[in-house]
């Protein structure tokens, strides 16, 4: 009985979620929640180039920062998505996810995964790609990443999604749309001329 209780606690205490082998804390089902993706591109296909995944955040203003075109300081596009299908998201804070990963990768890869902001702080691109492949191979639809940089006072959680087909495009926002949002104006007031 004690073993079962420890196992159940490691699953977030939700036995029904374990029928499908996915802890409820990582199985995202809310199809009405808005997720945003900022990009300087007008289409979404170029967004996967750098890391092999598609990044989303629930913070519209944070997504806008990724829409900025560095060469000229002009803002590009923010796309709003909702979930099409439930998604199983890898979370390094989950005991079960950490255990699964530890059992399936090298010590070096595991150490990289438990490092804060591992996706952007690792200079070893091959290791980063191996880690993403391992998470995919374990059956996850994406992963949590937390981007924290010294020059940015914001603590920004994001979700890296492997397949865009799990999402429904709701709306595309352009610069004029950004200007009508108070949180955007406040966060970028020094950049708005």
Image (tube, grey):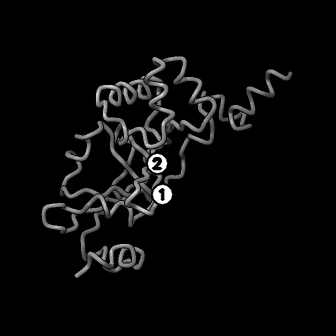
- Distance from the alpha carbon under mark 1 to that under mark 2: 7 Å
The quarter of the displayed image where residue 185 is located: bottom left
The N terminus: image quadrant: top right
Q: Is residue 190 above or below residue 25?
A: below
- The answer to whether 31 appears left or right of 74 in the picture is right
The residue shown at (45%, 59%) is 34
The residue shown at (44%, 22%) is 108
Query: Closer to the camera, 47 or 172?
Result: 47
Tell me the SS state at disc 2: strand
The residue shown at (44%, 30%) is 112
Pointer 2: what residue?
A: 146
**Of label 1 and label 2, which has the lower sequence position?**
2
- The answer to whether 86 appears left or right of 80 in the picture is right
| Dots 1, 2 in contact, CB < 8 A | yes
The circle on residue 58 is none
The residue shown at (25%, 47%) is 47
Task: Give x and y (percent) for residue 78.
Answer: 30, 62
Task: Give x and y (percent) for residue 127.
Answer: 35, 26
Task: Give x and y (percent) for residue 80.
Answer: 36, 59
Pointer 1: what residue?
A: 155
């Amino acid at each position: 009985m004690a073993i079962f209780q420890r196992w159940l606690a490691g699953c977030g205490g939700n036995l029904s979620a374990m029928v499908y082998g996915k802890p409820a804390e990582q199985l995202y089902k809310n199809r009405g929640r808005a997720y945003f993706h900022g990009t300087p591109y007008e289409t979404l296909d170029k967004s996967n180039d750098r890391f092999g995944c598609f990044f989303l955040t629930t913070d519209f203003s944070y997504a806008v920062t990724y829409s900025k075109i560095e060469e000229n300081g002009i803002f590009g596009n923010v796309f709003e998505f909702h979930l099409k299908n439930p998604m199983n998201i890898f979370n390094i804070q989950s005991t079960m996810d950490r255990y699964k990963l530890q059992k399936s990768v090298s010590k070096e890869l595991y150490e990289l995964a438990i490092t804060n902001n591992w996706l952007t702080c690792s200079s070893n691109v091959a290791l980063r790609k191996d880690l993403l492949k391992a998470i995919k191979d374990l059956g996850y639809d994406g992963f949590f990443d937390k981007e924290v940089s010294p020059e940015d006072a914001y603590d920004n959680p994001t979700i890296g999604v492997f397949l865009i087909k799990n999402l429904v495009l709701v709306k595309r926002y352009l610069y004029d749309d950004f200007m009508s949002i108070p949180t955007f104006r406040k966060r970028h007031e020094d950049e708005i001329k």
